[in-house]
């Protein structure tokens, strides 16, 4: 291996070319077009890991149908606070996309987003009562205006013919419908954002480049290895964002910042059943979410999902969870072992002990036979035949393990931004619903890492131009909520 001695420098280094880096780079260039930005991706294209449509991202999470976002509280009521928060955050993402389409930074929005109604579907008296409670609570917010509920099997069959075909269901049934739901191809969106950034002066996008070292040396010093030639070079950056999916924690630990101590990672693999029968695919136009099995992790909520991938309509069911030691789909089997060190061994080990039931569930999922997978599918598509479905390997999700006050590990489901005290380096850890709420997450990062500039009149005005509801609540302003949604529909 040979080394290049000539260093280069940028204002902002983005590690990973997924939806998070693409969103942050876009926001930073809109807020300050003079910033120089370098994007470094170890694979040969953008969005090839978690952001890819065949992997994990894609629903357009808005809280419309995801029942795990609205758990029952201890008093029996339904807590809808998370669904409200995610719905508001998703609207921020749509506002940015609409602004970028209007300004010519993104092409035809149909290349990455389509209107697909979102449904929740349950059966059994207890779950029907839960869905009715959820429906009443959500209707109090303009973010869920227009949500329909029915217990009429005939009406459900009109909405969801594949769900109601075959053996007649005798249980109590209920479904809710949000007609304004979306399907988002975050792979296509990310590539469009990266392509737009790459065309701008002062922005460089380098593929096949692996960041092998990060350390503080005045500005941050990044050692970058060209995977094709083996050559290494040094890039210095005033600010570094690590959006490298499952490898984010590994890279953050190399920085040596104390804020990363006590974090660990728990990888979960996944698979879909992919429909190969074009007639079935065309008959289903919906995202249908049910309730997760008892003991299942939140990311394993079953759904029968219409998606557009590479211009074609597809139909997926799943995901089926599994256990893995990799942190990336293209990673190493030694990733998990290599992530454990003195600083996090107690949190990781204690989280493993306290979540033994989850580990057992994941092992069981990984060992499901074809007949067992089909049996789960037939709860949502009763007439499903084995010859119409094939296994599609999904991406990986790396959940956070975070040390609590006792130093023991707590397994977190969600996303978390970790930043240094001086705001010069940040990393995104965790998984769903990150992609759908990327704009809100990156705005939080900007406020923490660029506090003075973010609070300036100039940046605040530019945020309001890009995001009409910036600094305001759509939950508290029905007229504003309707207007931002109408703007998107018009685009």
Image (cartoon, rainbow, N blue to C red):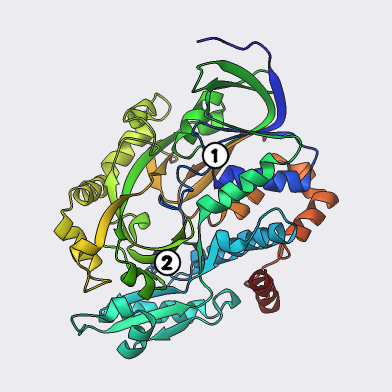
The secondary structure type at the circle numbered 1 is loop
Relative to 444, is 329 on the left or the right?
left
Q: Earlier in the sequence, mark 1 or mark 2?
A: 2
Q: Quadrant of the C terminus?
A: bottom right
Count all numbered tags in the image, as a single digit.
2
At which x and y percent is residue 423? Answer: 67, 35
The secondary structure type at the circle numbered 2 is loop
Of 128 and 463, nearer the camera is: 463
Tell me which residue sits at (68%, 13%) in the image: 6
Question: Disc 2 designates what residue?
Answer: 66
Tell me which residue sits at (48%, 31%) in the image: 261
At which x and y percent is residue 265? Answer: 40, 38
Establish if 96 lies above or below 78.
above
Relative to 227, is 470 on the left or the right?
right
Q: Is residue 447 in sight in this rendering?
A: no
Question: Disc 1 designates what residue?
Answer: 243
Q: Is residue 333 in sight in this rendering?
A: yes
């Amino acid at each position: 291996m040979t080394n290049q001695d000539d260093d280069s420098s940028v204002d902002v280094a983005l590690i990973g070319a997924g939806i998070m880096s693409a969103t942050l780079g876009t926001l930073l260039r809109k807020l300050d077009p003079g910033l120089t930005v370098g994007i470094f991706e170890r694979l040969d294209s953008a969005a090839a890991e978690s952001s890819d449509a065949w992997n994990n991202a894609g629903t357009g999470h808005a809280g419309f149908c995801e029942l795990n976002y609205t758990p029952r509280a201890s008093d029996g009521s339904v807590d809808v606070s998370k669904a409200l928060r995610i719905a508001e955050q998703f609207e921020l993402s749509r506002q940015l996309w609409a602004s970028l389409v209007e300004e010519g930074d993104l092409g035809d929005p149909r290349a990455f987003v389509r209107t697909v109604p979102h449904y929740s579907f349950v059966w059994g008296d207890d779950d029907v009562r839960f869905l009715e409670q959820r429906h009443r609570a959500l209707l109090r917010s303009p973010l869920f205006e227009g949500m329909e509920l029915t217990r009429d099997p005939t009406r459900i069959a009109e909405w969801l013919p594949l769900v109601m075909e075959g053996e007649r269901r005798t249980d109590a049934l209920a479904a809710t419908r949000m007609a304004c739901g979306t399907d988002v191809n975050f792979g296509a969106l990310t590539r469009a954002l990266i392509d737009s950034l790459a065309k701008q002066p002062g922005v460089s996008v380098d593929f096949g480049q692996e960041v092998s070292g990060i350390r503080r040396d005045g500005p941050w010093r990044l050692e970058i290895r060209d995977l094709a030639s083996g050559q290494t070079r040094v890039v210095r950056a005033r600010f570094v964002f690590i959006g490298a999916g499952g490898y984010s924690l590994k890279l953050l630990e190399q920085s040596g910042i104390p804020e990363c101590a006590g974090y660990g990672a728990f990888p979960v693999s996944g698979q879909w059943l992919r429909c190969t029968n074009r007639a079935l695919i065309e008959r289903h136009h919906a995202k249908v979410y049910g309730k997760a099995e008892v003991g299942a992790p939140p990311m394993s909520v079953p759904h029968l999902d219409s998606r557009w991938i590479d211009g074609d309509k597809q139909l997926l069911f799943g995901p089926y969870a599994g256990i893995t030691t990799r942190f990336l789909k293209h990673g190493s089997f030694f990733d998990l072992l290599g992530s454990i060190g003195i600083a996090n061994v107690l949190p990781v080990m204690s989280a493993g002990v306290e979540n033994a039931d989850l580990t057992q569930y994941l092992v069981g999922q990984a060992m499901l036979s074809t007949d067992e997978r089909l049996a789960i599918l037939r709860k949502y598509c009763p007439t499903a035949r084995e010859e119409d479905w094939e296994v599609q390997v999904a991406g990986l999700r790396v959940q956070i393990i975070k040390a609590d006050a006792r130093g023991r590990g707590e397994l977190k489901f969600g996303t978390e931004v970790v930043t240094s005290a001086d705001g010069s380096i940040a990393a995104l850890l965790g998984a769903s619903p990150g992609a759908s709420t990327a704009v809100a997450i990156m705005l939080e990062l900007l406020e923490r890492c660029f506090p003075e500039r973010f609070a300036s009149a100039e940046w605040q005005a530019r945020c309001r131009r890009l995001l009409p509801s910036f600094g305001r609540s759509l939950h508290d302003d029905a007229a504003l909520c309707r207007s931002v949604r109408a703007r998107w529909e018009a685009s």
